[in-house]
Each structure stands twice: as structure tokens, then as C-alpha cells.
Image: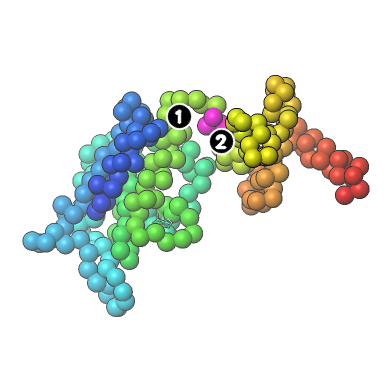
């Protein structure tokens, strides 16, 4: 997959895309990241890309021409790709969208800065994405988030495909807790069930922990999660146990 990133700060991406799992995916050619400094499309001697807002107010706004000219050039430099504006006004990113994005052979990410874009630039976006209900100083960290999450969905990136399937959100519910040695650390014990090697019981334990954590901490996700028949048995057992204990 190829990801083009249009930004005023291309240098801040280097470390993130050089290291660890993402770095390996880049080196193995699973993901090809192309950074574009859109200052090059700025106007005049100072390569100006922004101006004060009409109507007054704080901060600066991206002018339409430099960014749109850059987007149009980048679009032409490869196969057809959606242009995605990274803005707090965008569609909230979730794992479902991440999986959809991973199906493209190429995407173009546009990072905002300052107080925002001239509204007329928005016509150039196929859609806008937000990574959550808070405001960042720019779209760069959001772009890194998108690339990280999407690249994990490309087969081969994460080495062990099973770990991707089991991960939080991938199946619509949160991950179960994990433990490693020592079994007793500062008096905190690893549940016995994880140490007895009975994989049917271990899987059931993990699934019930996932379901319960999701129900308690993210009822919004739980409400739309797909529960299978054995999940329903798990809840029935919990209800039976609590009624036996007069809870
Ligand atoms: Cl994509 N950009 C900015 N500036 N802030 C955000 C965001 C994006 N997503 C959440 N907050």
C-alpha cells in the first residue's frame, strides 16, 4: 500500500516510520510512505501558505491555492486514491474504518495546521477523518495514527496474524488481560486457569474477561458487538453463579 502525506512538517514523521513494526513494514515494502512538503506550493518570495481569517478572529487559515495545487499534483503522481483531510470535523476513526482504508492500494492524507483550512479546500477532499473528540495542534499525529492502525491490517506487517485478530476492537470487543512471568509479583497472582494448560478453559476465561471488560468500560461498543452462542452461555453462567451466591 502506498500512503502519500501532505504536510508542512515532513521531518516529524521520520522517526515514527523508521522504527519497530512500522519501520519493518516500510523496509519490507509492504507500505510505501511518500511525504510531500506543501510549502513548495506557497505563494510569493516567502512561499506563503496561510493568511488571516476573513471576518477576524485568532490564528491563520490555509489559503486554498497552495494546498489544492499540491493535492492535485500528488493525485496525479500515482494510481487513483482517496484524498483524506485530517481535521477535528472529520468522521471519527474506528477499527471498522481502519479495515476499510487498508483495502485501498493507495491513500492520500492531508494534514491541517493552525486554525484550519479555507472552507473551499474541503471540496478537494473525498472525506475528512478525525481521531477523536479533542483538538490537536495539527493533523500530523492523526496521520501517524492512521498509518499505524492501517498498516497493522496489511497481511505480513504484524508477523503473527493471530495477534491481530485477537486484538482489541478487531472483533468488536476489547482485548483480555495478559500476564507473563513471574506468576507471583509483589503478591499479585496470575489467575490459576492461565497456568494449567487447558486451552479450552483458557479461551473461555479470556473471552469472558473480554466480554465483561467491554460491557463495563465500553457499553457503547458492547451494544453493537456480535455475540455468538457460547458468549451467551458465558453470561448465563455468570448469572447462575451470582444467583447461587445470592448476589
Ligand atoms: Cl485529524 N486533526 C486535529 N487538528 N485535531 C484532531 C484530529 C485531527 N482528530 C482529532 N483531533
Q: What residue do we see at 39% from left, 59% from top?
A: 136
Sort mark 2 into few (<14), some (14-19) or many (20+) by Cα contacts within 10 Å: some
Q: Residue under label 1, please give it.
A: 158
Q: Looking at the picture, does residue 58 appear above or below residue 145?
A: below
In the image, residue 27 sits, relative to residue 216, either above or below, namely above
The x and y percentages for residue 176 are: 63, 37
Mark 1: give few (<14), some (14-19) or many (20+) Cα within 10 Å.
some
Visible in this render: residue 116?
A: yes
Residue 224, above or below 60: above
At x 33%, y 38%, the residue is: 17
- Residue toward you, 60 or 70: 60
Residue 203 placement (x, y as % from top left) = 69, 28
Residue 102 position, x and y percent, is 43, 36
Residue 177 included in the magenta stretch of the image: no
Q: From the viewer's perspective, is 186 left or right of 6?
A: right
Which quadrant of the view contains residue 43? bottom left
Q: Mark 1 or mark 2, which has the lower sequence index?
A: 1
CB under 8 Å between discs 1 and 2: no
Residue positioned 46% across, 60% down in the render: 134
> Mark on residue 167?
2
188, 150: nearer the viewer:
188
Question: Is disc 1 placed on a helix, strand or loop?
Answer: loop
In this view, which residue lies farthest toward the front? Answer: 186
Q: Give the range drawn in magenta.
A: 163-167
Q: Does the residue labelled 2 lie within 8 Å of ligand 1?
A: no
Tell me how far mark 1 sits from mark 2, CA to CA.
Answer: 11 Å
- Residue drawn at x 66%, y 46% is 214
Amino acid at each position: 500500500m502506498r500512503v502519500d502525506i501532505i504536510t508542512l512538517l515532513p521531518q516529524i514523521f521520520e522517526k515514527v516510520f523508521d522504527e519497530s513494526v512500522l519501520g519493518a513494514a516500510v523496509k519490507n515494502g509492504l507500505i510505501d510512505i511518500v511525504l510531500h512538503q506543501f510549502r513548495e506550493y506557497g505563494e510569493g518570495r516567502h512561499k506563503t501558505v496561510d493568511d488571516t481569517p476573513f471576518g477576524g478572529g485568532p490564528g491563520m487559515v490555509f489559503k486554498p491555492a497552495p494546498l489544492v495545487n499540491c493535492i492535485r499534483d500528488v493525485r496525479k503522481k500515482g494510481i487513483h486514491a482517496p484524498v483524506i483531510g485530517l481535521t477535528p470535523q472529520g468522521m471519527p476513526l474506528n477499527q471498522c474504518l481502519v479495515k476499510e482504508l487498508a483495502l485501498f492500494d493507495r491513500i492520500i492524507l492531508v494534514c491541517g495546521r493552525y486554525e484550519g483550512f479555507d472552507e473551499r479546500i474541503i471540496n478537494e477532499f473525498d472525506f475528512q477523518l478525525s481521531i477523536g473528540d479533542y483538538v490537536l495542534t495539527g493533523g500530523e499525529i492523526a496521520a501517524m495514527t492512521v498509518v499505524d492502525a492501517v498498516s497493522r491490517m496489511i497481511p505480513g506487517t504484524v508477523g503473527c496474524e493471530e495477534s491481530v485478530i485477537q486484538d482489541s476492537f478487531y472483533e468488536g470487543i476489547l482485548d483480555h488481560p495478559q500476564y507473563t512471568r513471574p506468576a507471583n509479583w509483589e503478591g499479585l497472582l496470575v489467575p490459576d486457569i492461565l497456568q494449567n494448560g487447558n486451552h479450552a478453559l483458557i479461551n473461555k476465561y479470556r473471552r469472558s474477561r473480554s466480554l465483561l471488560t467491554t460491557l463495563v468500560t465500553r457499553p457503547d461498543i458492547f451494544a453493537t458487538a456480535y455475540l455468538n452462542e457460547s458468549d451467551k452461555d458465558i453470561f448465563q453462567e455468570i448469572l447462575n453463579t451470582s444467583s447461587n451466591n445470592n448476589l
